[in-house]
Image (cartoon, helix red, strand yellow):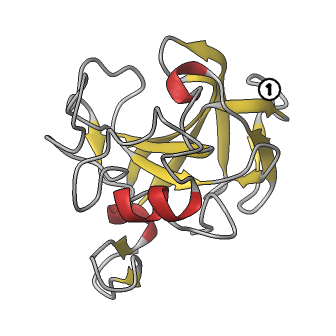
Amino acid sequence: MKTPLNEMVIRTPELDEARYPKKHHPNIGHLKHPFGGTMGTGVRRHGAKNHAGWDLYAEPGTPAYAIADGKVVQVGTITGYGNIAILEFSFRGRTLYALYAHLKQALVHPGAHGDVKEGRVIAFTGTTGNAGGEPPHLHFEIWTKRQVHRFPDGRISPGEVLGYQFDNMDNRRLNSDVG
């Protein structure tokens, strides 16, 4: 599996403060210790406290990659997610869907020409949807079905596919039991 970004750094409150000091970015600060950019319940301080995927730091215009060979099944917008691309792929005999959100631009289209190879640049990151005013990031989810509803419906941690788990030591380590 190819990671969706070359540099996989997940958002944390500490890194938000280091990269985007509150004195210059007063709207930042809603992530809850320790990992507000990860998937799960109660990861936000205000508003929606559930988070359905991973927030990975990415300046607007950063290339986002197809994590596997697959087929683009949707490009467009979804409320909150902004501009999106969804890639259907197989993993361990299952059909899964990778959602790339807050995009500036998708470089792929669904349909007859929607087949992509692992590692192909499929989009550029942006700040669309509810990412405005946030540190720039790619929101990345893995779905177990084509259409999902409110979290946690139809979602698994991207780490189950990519083979990463996040901890409070170096923010990323390979999980040898996955991927």
Q: What residue is shown with label 1?
A: 109
Identify which amino acid the numbered label 1 is placed on. Answer: His
In the rendered image of this protein, does residue 167 appear above or below residue 94? below
In the rendered image of this protein, does residue 130 appear above or below residue 31? above
Compared across the picture, whether 71 is left or right of 116 comes to left
| Residue 120 percent across, percent down from the top left | 80, 56
| Residue 175 percent across, percent down from the top left | 33, 83
Residue at image position (38%, 64%) is 14
| Nearer-the-camera pick, 155 or 73 | 155
Residue at image position (59%, 44%) is 24
Question: Which image quadrant: the N terminus?
Answer: bottom right
Residue 92 visible in rendering: no
| Nearer-the-camera pick, 126 or 67 | 126
In the rendered image of this protein, does residue 27 appear above or below residue 135? above
Question: Which image quadrant: the C terminus?
Answer: bottom left
Residue 125 visible in rendering: yes
| Residue 149 percent across, percent down from the top left | 28, 17
Residue at image position (82%, 45%) is 61
| Nearer-the-camera pick, 37 or 63 | 37
User: Image quarter for residue 163?
Assistant: bottom left
